[in-house]
Image (cartoon, rainbow, N blue to C red):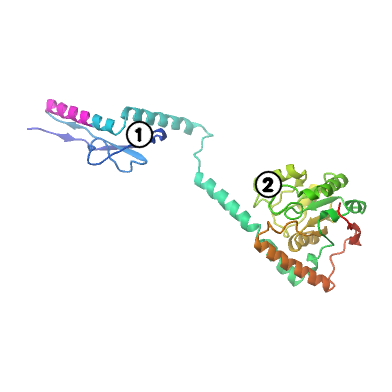
Amino acid sequence: MQSTSITPLHTCFYPIPKHFYSPHRSLNLNKKTLPRSSLCSTHFTNKCCFTLSSTHSCSQDQQKHKRDNNNNNSTDLDQQNGIYWEEFYTSIQEERTQYRENKEDPKFELPNRSGIYTNMWWTDLKAAVGQRVNVEGIVSSLGVFSKDKHLAIPHVIVPDIRYIDWAELKKRGFQGVVFDKDNTITVPYSLSLWSPLATSIDQCKSLFGNNIAVYSNSAGLDEYDPDGRKARILERAIGIKVIRHRVKKPAGTAEEIEKQFGCESSRLIMVGDRPFTDIVYGNRNGFLTILTEPLSRAEEPLIVQQVRVLEVAFVNRWSSQGMKPVNHTLLPDCQQCVKDEPL
C-alpha cells in the first residue's frame, strides 16, 4: 500500500524581461502540449506563472523513473519552443537585483508616462482654445459695454509701429514701451519679429534702452507658457524682455510691468492690436495706448477674425458718436507722435 502526501501548490509571478520579446524567440505555447506541472499559460503575454509542487512516495524508483521522463519531455518541448529556462531565470534574477538597487536610490522614480502625456495634452489644448476665446476679455467687455466704453478708445491709431515717432514720445517724458506680441510685432503664434519692423524696433531700443518689454497673452503667461520656454525663445529672437504674468489681459493690474520698469504706468506706452484686450487693459491702468492694425489676418483663426471685426466696429461707432479716450497728461495732443511716412 502506497502512502502519498501532497503539499500545497506555490505560484510565483515574474515579469518577462524585455530582451525576451524577440522575433527569433517565438513562444508558441499550447495548453494541450505543456505539462501542468511546468507552466500555466494564463496571461503569458505579460507574465509567466510557474507552479511548483512536491510529492512524496514510498516507491522511490518509480518516482525517479517518472521524474526523469517528465524532465526529458519538458526539455524537448522547451527546446522546440525556443525557451531557455536557465537563461530566463537568470535574467529575472538580474532584473530583480537591479530594481532593488534602483529603488534604494532616493533619486529613483518610476515614470508616470500617462500623467506626462495627459498634462502636455491638456496644456496644449488650453493654450489653443484660450488664445482663440479670451474668457477674461469677454467678461471685461460686458463692463465696457455697460459703463466704460471710453476704455476701448485708443489714444493713437496707426497702421503699424513704423508710424510711431519714438523720439517725440521720449521727449514728452515717457520712460518705457510695452508691446503686445501676436499681430503687433510678430505674426500670430510666431516667436520671431516680423522683419519689416526691425528698423522701428531698433530705434525704439536706442531711445528707451532696456525699458522695452513684451506683455502677451501667449508667451510669458503662466497658464499657456508655464515653464517660460516660449518667452525665452522670443527674448533671444527679438532681444526684448518678456514679462511673466499670471492674469490675461485686459484683466489684472500693472504691478508686474511697473516693477519691471521701475516707474508708474502713466509714464509707459502700451502698443497692441486688440481694442478690447490691449487698449482696455492699457487705459484702465493709466498707459498711453496705441492701437495698430493686425500684421496678418491669414494666420488668425476664424473666430479671432470675427471678434476683431466686432471690436473695430464698436470702436468706430463710439468714436463717431464723439466718445474720446482717457486724457493723458504727458501727451494732450496724441497725433503729435504719429508719422506720415513709416521708417
* The N terminus, quarter of image: top left
Secondary structure, magenta segment, majority class: helix
The residue sitting at the left extreme is: 1
The amino acid pointed to by label 1 is Arg
Left or right: 108 in relation to 217: left
Q: Residue 84: give x, y in percent of width and height.
A: 32, 29
The residue to which callout 1 is attached is 25
Left or right: where 155 falls relative to 121:
right
Which residue does the numbered mark 2 point to in the structure image? Answer: 230
Q: Residues within 10 Å of mark 2 (few under 14, many from 20)?
A: some
Of circles 2 and 1, the one toward us is: 1
Q: Residues within 10 Å of mark 1 (few under 14, many from 20)?
A: few
Extreme-bottom residue of the structure: 321
The answer to whether one can see residue 286 in this image is no
Q: Which SS class for mark 2?
A: helix
Instruction: Name which residue lies at 75% across and 69% down.
Output: 313
Front-lying residue, 119 or 58: 119
Residue range (magenta) = 59-73
